[in-house]
Image (tube, helix red, strand yellow):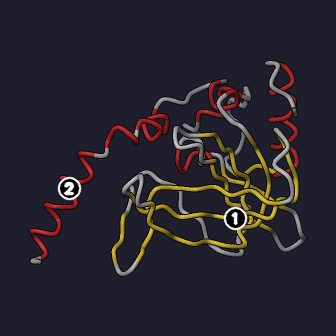
Amino acid sequence: MLLGQRFLVLAVVSLLTLPILPAQTSYFSVTGNGFLEGTRFVFLGKLVDKVSYRDVEAGHIFTRHVFQVSEAVKGNPGDQVEVIEYGGTVDGETLQVSHGPSYVLGQEYLVFSYIDLLDHDRTLSGPLGQFQVVSDREGGKTIRLYPTHPLRAALKLGKAPVFMELNGFCDRVRNRLDEIGYGKE
C-alpha cells in the first residue's frame, strides 16, 4: 500500500474510533483545584519499564509505563504503578499523540494520574501532570513548575520560583489536598 493510502486508512480508522478518546479531552479542561481533585494518585517514582502494544479491541497503540513508587502523595498506589498512555511504536508503526506526556526509562518523576474511560491510569492533563525530578550536586531534588501551570493557582503559589524543592512542593500538595478534603486515602 502506498504511503498516502496508508495514511488515509489510518486517518479514517482514527476518526471511527474517536468515541473512545473522550478521556483525552480532559487534558485541556483541568484547572485550579480540579487538578488536585481529578487525580487518583500523586506519586514519586522511577520509570523502570516502558512497553508499547496494540490493543486490537480499542484499535490503538498504547504504551505501558511502569513506575517503582518511592513516595505516595495522594492515594495508595502500592510499590508499582502502571500508567498507560496513547501512542507508541509497534511493528514499525508509530502512533504519536500531540500534548501527550513523554517518559524516559530510569528517570524519576512526580506523577499526577487519573482513571480514564478505558480504566487505565493515565497522566492527568498530559505533560502538565508529570514533573521530571532533577537532582543537584548536593543531592537535593527539584521540579520545574512553569508560571502558567494550573497547580500554581490551586496551591496558591503566586510568584514562587520556577524551580521548586521537591519535598516542599509535595508538602504543599498534601496540605492543599487536606484543605479541600482529598487527602491521602
Q: Amino acid at mark 2?
A: Ala
List the single residue furthest toward the top. 180
Q: Amino acid at mark 1?
A: Val
The secondary element bearing badge 1 is classed as strand
Query: Label 2: how many residues lie within 10 Å, few (<14), some (14-19) or many (20+)?
Result: few
- In the image, what residue occupies the spot 81% across and 48% down? 77
Residue wearing tag 1:
66
Query: Label 1: how many residues lie within 10 Å, few (<14), some (14-19) or many (20+)?
Result: some
- In the image, what residue occupies the spot 40% across and 41% down? 20
List the single residue furthest toward the bottom. 92
| Quarter of the picture holding the N terminus | bottom left
Residue wearing tag 2:
11
**Residue 114 placement, left or right of 55:** right
Q: Nearer the viewer, residue 156 or 56?
A: 56
Q: Position of residue 32 (x, y in %)?
A: 62, 25
Q: Nearer the viewer, residue 177 or 162?
A: 177
When the figure is inspected, residue 106 is found, relative to residue 13, above or below; the finding is below
The secondary element bearing badge 2 is classed as helix
